[in-house]
Image (tube, grey):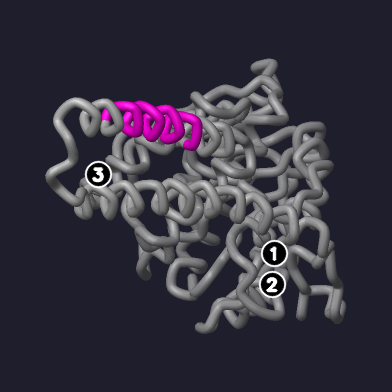
Amino acid sequence: MALVSIVVPCYNEEESMPVFYKEVTGVLKKMNVDYEIIFVDDGSKDKTLDVAKRLRKQDDKVRYISFSRNFGKEAGMLAGLEAAKGDYVAVMDADMQDPPSLLPEMYEAVTTGGYDCAATRRTNRKGEPPIRSFFARMFYRIINKISDANIVDGARDFRLMKRIMVDAVLSLGEYNRFSKGIFGWVGFKTKWFEYVNVERVAGETKWSFWKLFKYSFEGIMAFSTTPLYISSFMGFIVCIVSFIMACFYAIKALIFGDPAAGFPTIVCIMLFLGGIQLIGIGVVGMYLSKTYLETKRRPIYIIRESEDNEENVTN
């Protein structure tokens, strides 16, 4: 009997975890598979860890990992994937926005349909603020044009993968991780399942607009060097414009004289050039900071506690 691992990153999800556990186990028991559910507590401030321990006592198929602090969802997914023992591994959120009812179809796709991965995408963004939805769509358009990562608009982290794909994902040991891009970059044959956006069963989203904005930049810098080329191109254009303006004002002064001091023009030009330089330095600085973090070789996460009571396990 095949073993299916369900990886569930959690941050302050004490209210939704029991609902998720009940729903997902009900589906898995009907699939005629062996399974394990791995809750990864990402340094939660509520009773998420206590709920995971209670579920573990009720069901030995439940496993848990608890971080020493909040390392972020990417670290939670990585820890769960590394801990998973299954022939097939799924990543799901505990808030029920990833419908467990899709698991049987996804499992059939990777077992008999000839696919290596069954992934999901939302067909709409009902319930999201319009400005957030607009920037999300723009992000997918931009990153697909400037990078090699094939990221489908509306793609969720919810997917079921064969062990061969999981191993490929884990082989990328980078510190600055952007899993949506990694899943697309490693390739493999993927079948997409679409569903209408589902509201959280409990609690509030942990993703503010600012966090999503920063996360989008992480993704762009992780899979594209195009911003560096754009910065250089902008510098080249500014040089050309400056040269043309210098010629224009020189000819104008020779023909008509220079009755005005030109102070406003100088100030505008200085501010414009200063802004372009700061943008360029900022872009280079962001790439340099990512290189700096990679070279430090710090662990992506630190485990404080797990069902095996291991202490200070790092990766």
In the rendered structure, find residue 126 and report the number of the disc placed on it.
3
**Callout 1 amino acid:** Val
**Does any portion of residue 137 appear in the rendered image?**
yes
| In front: label 1 or label 3 | 3
Magenta range: 235-248
Residue 77: image x %, image y %? 66, 55
Q: Are marks 2 and 1 in contact (CB under 8 Å)?
A: yes
Q: Is residue 19 above or below residue 261?
A: below
How far is mark 1 from mark 3, CA to CA? 33 Å
SS class of the residue under badge 1? Answer: strand
Q: Is residue 239 part of the magenta span, yes or no?
A: yes
Seen from the viewer's position, the closer of residues 250 and 57 is 250
Q: Which residue position holds label 1? A: 62
SS class of the residue under badge 3? Answer: loop
Q: Is residue 253 part of the magenta span, yes or no?
A: no
| In front: label 2 or label 3 | 3
